Image: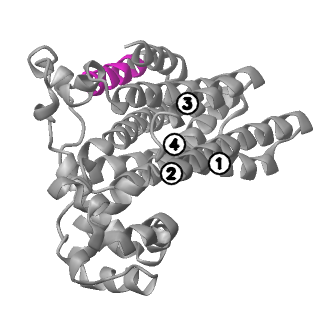
Amino acid sequence: AVSVAYLCSVVLKVITPRWLAWMTTAVIASLCVHPRFGLWHLEILSESLSLSLSILVVATWLQFARVPTRRQFAYGITAIIAWMSMRDVHIVSGLVIAGTLVIGTVTCRTWTLRRTALIGSAMLAIFASYVLIAQGSSNRNLYPLINNIGKRVLQNDELLRTFNARGMPVDEAIQERSGDDTWSDDQAFLRSAELAPFRTWAEDHGQRALLTSLVVDATYWIDTTGDVLHSSLPLDFSEYDRHSTSERLPTRLFWIQGPRTSAQFAVWGLAALVSLGIVLGASHRREPAHESIGNLRKRAGIVAVVGFVAAVADLFVSASGDSVEVQRHVLGSILRLSLLAVVTAALGASTVVHLLMHHL
């Protein structure tokens, strides 16, 4: 609730005119209180803090677009690091943002701004490296890898051949585990003596093989991400709703519940792209009297672009990195993409309103 309130307060300062800002906050509130997002805040799962901190990240960087100071930049980096600490897949988004900051140093007009951006990107890269090393030393990523092998690789002949070419032993024992996950048949993947060669490969080379596959076999994994997204959008996750959240929170506050089908998701995405085009296009031909407002919208538009790229990367890694309970893993990406689409549409509408007012 605090993160949502902060985001709404920032939107009220970024979006003009006032009536449009209030409409935007109403849509944001409607999205965030929907039971499929709200129920996680009553569960002791990573999704709880992850959702709250992701909203805080969006709000903090929108505030940076409004007040681009070193202090606000530090708040933004801190929010990202806190969010990255919730789930290991978030480090991909963190690295995307770090890379963007490095690229952004080219446009910095002063050494102070350039140094601030470089320090921020270095902090994100260092924390991401720490997470990767910690996950590798603890073999935490072994379980998602096995889940993917059992439920995806062994059920796709072409993918199985590519993993076999990368050293994965393929024999009768491993093929019998097709469709299983790490915990099937009393954790056979982890305990069966016949699968000892597979476990050795998985611990030594499995992660590298999967990462290589995400690039080389990108078509398969993109299709998999699309399938996961398609199955996740209409879900209300009632099986996790132990506290009857759906009976307490409205499912259609202000008649908005976010995209629930792939077609609706595509429409929201198209609206966001068109709005970004309007915002960034109009920023090149603004009048001197409206220069400050135009600069604010341009900065907010850039924040939205980076946010979209980071969220899509997070969606891809969340959907591809594991095959068990994957629908709830992509929920955070869906929420961030939806919120960014709302904010971007509001920025586009704000730009159109101001252009019309200027020409009338």
Under circle 1, the secondary element is: helix
Mark 2 Cα within 10 Å, few/some/many (few <14, many 20+)?
some
Cα separation, mark 4 vs mark 1, equals: 21 Å
Cα separation, mark 3 vs mark 1, equals: 50 Å
Front position in the image: 174 or 250: 174
Main SS of residues in magenta: helix
Under circle 4, the secondary element is: helix
Q: Which amino acid lies under the numbered mark 4 shown in the image of this protein?
A: Gly
Q: Is residue 53 visible?
A: yes
Read off the residue under disc 3.
358
Residue at screen point 36% across, 47% down: 271
- Give the number of the mark in front: 3 or 4: 4
Mark 2 or mark 3: name the one nearer the start of the chain. 2
Mark 3 or mark 1: name the one nearer the start of the chain. 1
Cα separation, mark 3 vs mark 4, equals: 30 Å
Report the span colored magenta.
20-33
Read off the residue under disc 4.
307
Mark 1 Cα within 10 Å, few/some/many (few <14, many 20+)?
some
